[in-house]
Amino acid sequence: HPGTVGRALRGNELRILDEDGVQVATGEIGELYVRNGMLIGGYHKNPQATQDSLREGFFSVGDLARMDEEGDVYLASRKHDMIISGGVNIYPREIEEVLQLHAAVLEAAVIGVPDDEWGEVLRAFVVTRDNATLGEGEIRQHCSALLANYKLPKSIVFVEQLPRNATGKILKRQLREQ
């Protein structure tokens, strides 16, 4: 199925739980927990992080996901990347995927920035393909055709590249500091 990361492999048990540790309904987004015979013992020299990641023997690395009726798992975002704007949970990955559907966009990252009225609003960082000319208006039009109004970035910053760590992961922490 397009967009899925697959099903649990043999020997793995999955749970998708809400903030209270209750299993969410099929199709609902929650935190993904796994249990198997090869789980890590915990975070190195960080017992608090280990404790915070465990629920009844199931471990989470902070991924938010949903599961369909057939057991396929779809990642929504990282828990610490979730943006709360006007009391609504917004998952940046969905917006990033929509931005990257635009022919002139090479890659994008979305973060929440503080806002007095909404708590947080969306800011998109966009890298264009081969120095393509692209304006905020074109990005907004593209997004508004594919996203609900509350998921539209309030500001768009064009950058030459996104900051990454040694393994290639986008460093959203550095984007928040800009």
Image (spheres, rainbow, N blue to C red):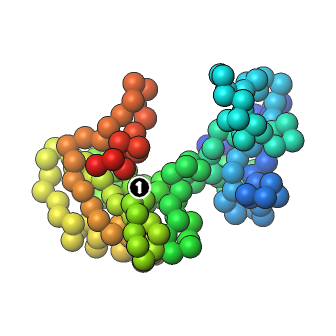
Residue extending farthest right: 56
x, y percentage for residue 18? 74, 58
Residue 42, compared with residue 173, is above or below; it is: above
Within-10-Å neighbours for mark 1: few <14, some 14–19, many 20+: many
Residue 34 in percent (x, y) is at 76, 38
Q: Is residue 162 visible?
A: yes
Q: Is residue 49 left or right of residue 109?
A: right
The residue nearer to you, when weighing 135 against 70, is: 135
Q: Residue at x 63, y 51 (%)?
A: 64
- Which is more toward the observer, 117 or 170? 117
Residue 129 image offset from top left, x and y in percent: 21, 46
Q: Element under label 1? A: strand
Mark 1: amino acid = Ile
Is residue 68 in view from this perspective?
no
Q: Position of residue 86 (x, y in %)?
A: 51, 75
Which residue corresponds to the image point at 67% horizontal and 35% vertical from the top-left?
A: 49
The residue at which mark 1 appears reads as 111
Number of callouts: 1
Q: Is residue 136 above or below residue 133?
A: below
Q: Residue at x 28, y 73 (%)?
A: 141
Does residue 166 lie above or below 66 as drawn?
A: above
Give the image quarter of residue 118.
Answer: bottom left
Residue at x 81% of width, y 43% of height: 55
